[in-house]
Image (cartoon, rainbow, N blue to C red):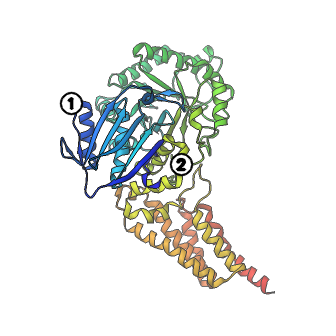
């Protein structure tokens, strides 16, 4: 039922009656002696500007912690969980009574964010809902090439992850020298202190924080001293409380580089099996709660190649293996490919999904479209999905929300609806309609190889009317359709309320505005095929092409070039003759 829609959508819900409507910001009535839950409820009320009372509130809140099977087990993926919760809303003396059942504070926090959306919609239904995630591991990685996020951006993204029920963050920016280039060097005191504060923030928000180290460019796998330096670095990170580690061997030469290693190992994968196994054994001796995720050198493909098959079959089952799918930036992820990987490696893949990342050769693109082409049942054959973000932290939030919605409940995931919700949440309600017009023209990415679907329809309709229909009607319909683009361009250039987002998107917003101008001028030439207009259009098109920022992509170019080359004019003459 649309009126009950929350993001991510809940798994099961039963409506029992009409909703309670709020005429003002609700007051929450809650009593408990449990310090942890009191603190969580106080923080939640402060975040939403709800007044918290011990009596005479509008909504009475009751918490019930339990370790019952129906709260701690998920049948669909056959796993124990601390993230499941139920919410039952009933009415006593016509006032809402909300009973939340959970096993762990993570489940409680997720429940509160669901309740928040129900309350903020100004109606609270008499209902019972049961909710839990389908994917066990749901999160993001800061693993792109480029300037790392600032700590304030990371903390803001942590809050977003909690709000949309993501549970994992991997710290692994390629341009942090201590992560990759200077992996042997311990963090300076100040840098370590910042990392600890970041980790502490993640802990408060119930996010599993993974520190990742990438020594593959220079490590000598057989060298005792290098292994000792690796352990010293990890012990330093462990000393601030971090117990989850990523060991990255990606983006390195596919063969052994050092003579000492060539004497010890027959090939690269043998060296990797040895060092990963020794590392994991040491980590488990140091702390039994430690988790390890490995990013292999071969991290994409069919999943049954020599390297990945041999690696997986020789690693401890408790070690997770990152996999990007059939391609580095995979167009789709499906059950068949996941099953091949599992059969070949004896591990379920933990997907490192290279979306929305836009580094390196993708730097001219802006990936803010919705998450697409991931099988709704992929959770049955994978450990989870970790999304690689863009260096543009604020813009990344838009696709992150859609990814979070898919990961929690992929069978009910509606990409377009969720995308529109994400834009309203990040851009702001007042700018969202115009922003959607813009965003529809920057969808281009590995998961969305076409672009500008609405603009393409406008061009197709115009060409049809020009040749086979009524030209005046075609131009009229074009003018009416393009007016929405002109309005959006003008408003967005004046400024988006979310100033940080506006600054990140400035090159794309400018290119969007120039593209609309180019489109209008092109149609003007079509209306009146004048040499001076054509010459002006050529100059405008040349300047437009010089800016490589990708907006409209290949949808606009063919149309402009057809007009410039005189295709329409020539065909007019042919038809006349």
Q: Nearer the viewer, mark 2 or mark 1?
A: 1
Q: Is residue 63 above or below residue 271?
A: below
Q: From the viewer's side, name the closer residue of 258 and 377.
A: 377
| Quadrant of the image containing the C terminus | bottom right
* Pointer 2 local density, CA inside 10 Å: few below 14, some 14–19, many at least 20: many
* Distance Cα–Cα, label 2 vs label 1: 43 Å
Left or right position of 488 against 257: left
Query: At 23% from the left edge and 35% from the top edge, which residue is drawn?
Result: 38
Q: At which x and y percent is residue 69?
A: 44, 26
- Circle 1 residue: 33
- Can residue 145 be seen here? no
Q: Please provide percent x and percent y for residue 569.
A: 71, 81
The quarter of the picture where residue 306 lies is top right
Determine the image quadrant of residue 444.
bottom right
In primary-sequence order, the first of circles 2 and 1 is: 1
72 on left or right of 571 = left
Label 1: few (<14), some (14–19) or many (≥20) C-alpha neighbours in 10 Å = few
Expressed as whole percent of the image width and height from the top left, the position of residue 340 reads 67, 31
- The picture places residue 409, in percent across and down from the top left corner, at 50, 42
Query: 246 above or below 124?
Result: above
The answer to whether residue 235 of the structure is visible from this angle is: yes
Image check: 122 left or right of 563? left
Q: Which mark is residue 371?
A: 2
Please tell me which residue lies in front, 498 or 86.
86
Q: Residue furthest right?
A: 577
SS at circle 1: loop
- Between 463 and 508, which is closer to the camera in this rendering? 463
Q: Give the left or right position of residue 173, taking residue 521 as reference.
A: left
- Circle 2 SS class: loop
Q: Nearer the viewer, residue 87 or 261?
A: 87
């Amino acid at each position: 039922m649309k009126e009950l829609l929350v993001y991510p959508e809940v798994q099961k819900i039963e409506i029992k009656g009409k909703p309670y409507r709020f005429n003002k910001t609700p007051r929450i009535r809650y009593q408990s002696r449990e310090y942890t839950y009191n603190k969580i409820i106080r923080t939640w009320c402060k975040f939403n500007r709800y007044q918290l009372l011990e009596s005479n509130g509008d909504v009475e809140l009751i918490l019930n912690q339990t370790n019952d099977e129906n709260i701690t087990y998920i049948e669909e993926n056959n796993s124990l969980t601390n993230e499941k919760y139920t919410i039952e809303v009933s009415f006593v003396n016509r006032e809402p009574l909300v009973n939340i059942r959970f096993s762990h504070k993570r489940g409680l926090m997720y429940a509160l964010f669901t309740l928040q959306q129900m309350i903020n919609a100004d109606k609270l239904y008499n209902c019972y809902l049961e909710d839990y995630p389908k994917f066990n591991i749901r999160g993001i990685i800061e693993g792109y090439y480029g300037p790392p996020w600032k700590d304030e951006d990371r903390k803001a993204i942590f809050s977003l992850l909690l709000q949309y029920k993501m549970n994992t963050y991997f710290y692994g920016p390629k341009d942090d020298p201590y992560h990759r280039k200077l992996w042997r060097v311990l963090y300076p005191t100040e840098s370590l202190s910042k990392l600890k504060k970041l980790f502490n923030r993640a802990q408060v928000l119930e996010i599993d924080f993974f520190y990742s180290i990438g020594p593959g460019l220079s490590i000598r796998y057989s060298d005792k001293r290098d292994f000792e330096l690796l352990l010293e670095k990890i012990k330093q990170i462990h000393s601030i409380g971090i117990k989850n580690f990523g060991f990255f061997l990606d983006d390195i030469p596919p063969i052994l580089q050092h003579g000492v290693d060539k004497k010890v190992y027959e090939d690269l994968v043998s060296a990797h099996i040895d060092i990963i196994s020794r590392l994991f054994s040491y980590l488990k001796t140091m702390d039994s709660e430690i988790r390890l995720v490995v990013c292999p050198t071969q991290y994409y493909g069919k999943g049954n190649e020599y390297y990945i098959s041999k690696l997986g079959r020789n690693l401890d089952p408790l070690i997770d293996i990152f996999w990007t799918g059939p391609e580095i930036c995979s167009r789709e992820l499906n059950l068949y490919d996941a099953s091949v990987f599992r059969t070949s490696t004896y591990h379920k893949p933990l997907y490192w999904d290279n979306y929305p990342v836009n580094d390196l050769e993708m730097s001219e693109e802006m990936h803010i479209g919705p998450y697409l082409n991931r099988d709704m049942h992929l959770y049955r054959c994978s450990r989870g999905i970790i999304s690689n973000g863009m260096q543009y932290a604020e813009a990344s939030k838009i696709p992150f929300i859609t990814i979070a919605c898919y990961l929690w409940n992929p069978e009910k995931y509606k990409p377009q609806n969720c995308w529109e919700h994400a834009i309203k949440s990040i851009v702001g309600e007042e700018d969202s309609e115009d922003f959607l017009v813009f965003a529809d023209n920057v969808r281009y990415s590995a998961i969305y190889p076409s672009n500008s679907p609405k603009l393409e329809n406008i061009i197709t309709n115009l060409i049809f009317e020009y040749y086979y229909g009524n030209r005046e009607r075609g131009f009229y319909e074009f003018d009416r359709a393009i007016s929405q683009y002109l309005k959006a361009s003008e408003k967005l250039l004046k400024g988006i309320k979310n100033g940080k987002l506006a600054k990140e998107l400035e090159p794309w917003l400018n290119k969007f505005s120039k593209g609309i101008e180019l489109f209008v001028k092109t149609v003007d030439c079509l209306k009146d095929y004048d040499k001076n207009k054509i010459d002006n259009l050529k100059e405008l098109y040349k300047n437009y092409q010089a800016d490589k920022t990708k907006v409209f992509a290949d949808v606009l170019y063919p149309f402009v070039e057809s007009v410039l080359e005189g295709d329409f004019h020539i065909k007019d003459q042919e038809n006349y003759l």
